[in-house]
Amino acid sequence: MLEIFETEISRLIKGEKRKVYVYVPDFEGSFPVLYMFDGQNIFLDEEATYGKSWGMLEYLEENEVPLIVVGVECNHHDEREKCGGRLSEYSPFFFEDHEWGYRIKGRGRTTMNWFVKELKPYIDDNYPTLPDRKNTFIAGSSMGGLMTLYALSKYNHVFSKGAALSPSVGFAPENVLDMIERSKYRKNTVLYMDYGENEIRYRNTRAIYADVTQALINKGVLLESRIVPKGNHNEASWEKQIPFFMDTFFYR
C-alpha cells in the first residue's frame, strides 16, 4: 500500500509543503523503516522528475519485503533563489564548483534535523514501525547518496544501515573524508555503496571513491562496495541495484 501526503517543512522553507510517499506492506506486523531522498523518483514513473522511477513499489510488492519505505520529495527551487535548491538541502557542506558555476551553502544539517526530529516521530506514531536504531535505515542516490553518508556518520545514533548509490563525494572530497575521520560509528553500522562503471570515469571520481571506501573501512563500517558493470547515473540504473542493497540490509 502506497500513501502520499503533503507536509510542511518549516525548518527549511517556512510555509512550503512537500510530498511524502509512504509504502506499508499489505500484511500484518511491525516493520523496519527505510527513509529515502528524492521521494518523487522512488515509486511512480508519473511522479518522477525525468519520467522514470526506481520501480521501488513493484519490487516491494513482488518480493513481499517486510519494510516500510518513506520517500520525501526534493526541493525544486533554483539554486540562485534565496531559499536555495536541492543541492543546498542535500549538501552537508559549503562548496564551489567553478566548472558548473555552483556556489552552494550546504543546509544538510537542517534537512536531517527535520528528518530526525519531525518526520521520524510522525512516521513512528502513525505507522506500524520498529522505531529503534537497529531497524531504521536511510538511502539515496547522487546528492541523496552524499546525504546518506552524512546521515550515517553524524546521526549514527538514529540510523544503523544505509545505501549510498552514486554518492556525490566529488563535490567536496576533503570535507567528506574529514567527516568520516571525525565520526564515531557503532560497530554494527552497515553501508552499501556503489558507482556505475560509466559514471566513475568522470573527473577523478574513481580515486575519490577509493579514498572514501578506504576511510570507511578504516573506521570499522561494515561496507559493501561495488562498481556496477555498465552502470549509469540515472534511475533506470539505480533500480537494478535495489536487490543488492536490500540483500545488504537483510543479510543474516
Image (spheres, rainbow, N blue to C red):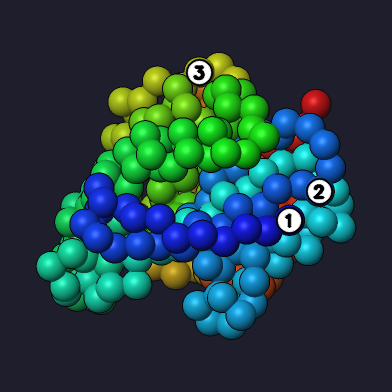
Estimate the spatial distance between the alpha carbons at disc 3 and disc 1, rounded to whole Å: 33 Å
Kind of residue indicated by mark 1: Met
Estimate the spatial distance between the alpha carbons at disc 2 and disc 3, rounded to whole Å: 33 Å
Q: Residue 26, which numbered label?
A: 2
185 horizontally vs 25: left or right: left
Residue 168, percent across and down?
41, 57
For disc 3, the marked residue is: 186
For the C terminus, the image quarter is top right
Single out the residue that lies furthest toward the left.
82
Residue 101, percent across and down?
19, 75
Q: What residue appears at the point 45 percent right and 60 percent down from the top-left corner?
A: 6
Kind of residue indicated by mark 2: Asp
Q: Examine the rendering and report whether any part of residue 242 can be seen.
A: yes
64 horizontally vs 69: left or right: right
Residue 250, percent across and down?
75, 34
**For the residue carrying disc 2, how many other residues have a C-alpha within 10 Å: few (<14), some (14-19), or many (20+)?**
few
**Do the residues bearing badges 1 and 2 touch, measured as CB atoms within 8 Å?**
yes
Q: What residue appears at the point 86 percent right and 58 percent down from the top-left corner?
A: 62
Kindly state the secondary structure of the residue where label 1 is placed: loop
Mark sitting earlier along the chain (1/2): 1
Single out the residue that lies furthest toward the top.
187
Q: What residue appears at the point 13 percent right and 67 percent down from the top-left corner?
A: 82
**For the residue carrying disc 1, how many other residues have a C-alpha within 10 Å: few (<14), some (14-19), or many (20+)?**
few
For disc 1, the marked residue is: 1
